Amino acid sequence: MVYAIVRAGGRQEKVSVGDLVTLDRVPVAAGGTIELAALLLVDGDKVTSAAADLAKVTVTAEVVENLRGPKIVIQKYKNKTGYKKRQGFRSALTKVKVTSIA
């Protein structure tokens, strides 16, 4: 089985061909393609981690959709002072499908 560890959106993800991965927002429309930087490539018993060899490796992914993550509610409260604060946040995400590891 061939899989790669790629850097995507400040995190590292383990991907193989056909996987759906959710990343931080990438400025590419749905249907476009992106290339992810490979940090490690595993092909059966052969492991490639040298920077010179990884420069030849390309991990290509197709953008499936741009979406927003779940709502996160942040609440702050201090007792006996009347201080209350409420804030919400939704992260911008992109769902991609890995098409090839070459």
Image (cartoon, grey):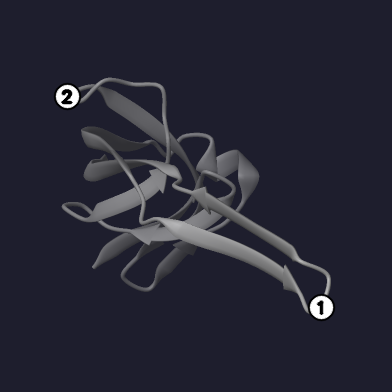
* The furthest residue to the right: 81
Q: Earlier in the sequence, mark 1 or mark 2?
A: 2
The local crowd at label 2, few if under 14, some if 14 to 19, many if 20 or more residues have their Cα within 10 Å, is few
Q: Nearer the viewer, residue 39 or 30?
A: 30
Horizontal arrangement in the rendering, residue 80 relative to residue 96 (left or right): right
Vertical placement of residue 24 versus 50, above or below: above
Quadrant hosting residue 67: top left
Q: Residue at x 52, y 43 (%)?
A: 9
Q: Nearer the viewer, residue 15 or 82?
A: 82
Q: Position of residue 1 (x, y in %)?
A: 23, 68
Q: Nearer the viewer, residue 73 or 68?
A: 73
Q: Residue at x 45, y 45 (%)?
A: 91
How far is mark 1 from mark 2, CA to CA? Answer: 54 Å
Q: Which mark is residue 80?
A: 1
Horizontal arrangement in the rendering, residue 38 relative to residue 81 (left or right): left
Q: Residue at x 41, y 22 (%)?
A: 27
Q: Hey, what amino acid is under mark 2?
A: Gly
Vertical placement of residue 38 versus 79, above or below: above
Q: Is residue 41 visible?
A: no
Q: Position of residue 36 (x, y in %)?
A: 43, 38
The local crowd at label 1, few if under 14, some if 14 to 19, many if 20 or more residues have their Cα within 10 Å, is few
- Which of discs 1 and 2 lies nearer the camera? The answer is 1
Vertical placement of residue 28 versus 15, above or below: above
Judged from the image, the secondary structure of the residue bearing numbered disc 1 is: loop
Q: Residue at x 42, y 35 (%)?
A: 25
Judged from the image, the secondary structure of the residue bearing numbered disc 2 is: loop
Horizontal arrangement in the rendering, residue 17 relative to residue 11 (left or right): left
Which residue was labeled with disc 2? 31
Q: Hey, what amino acid is under mark 1?
A: Lys
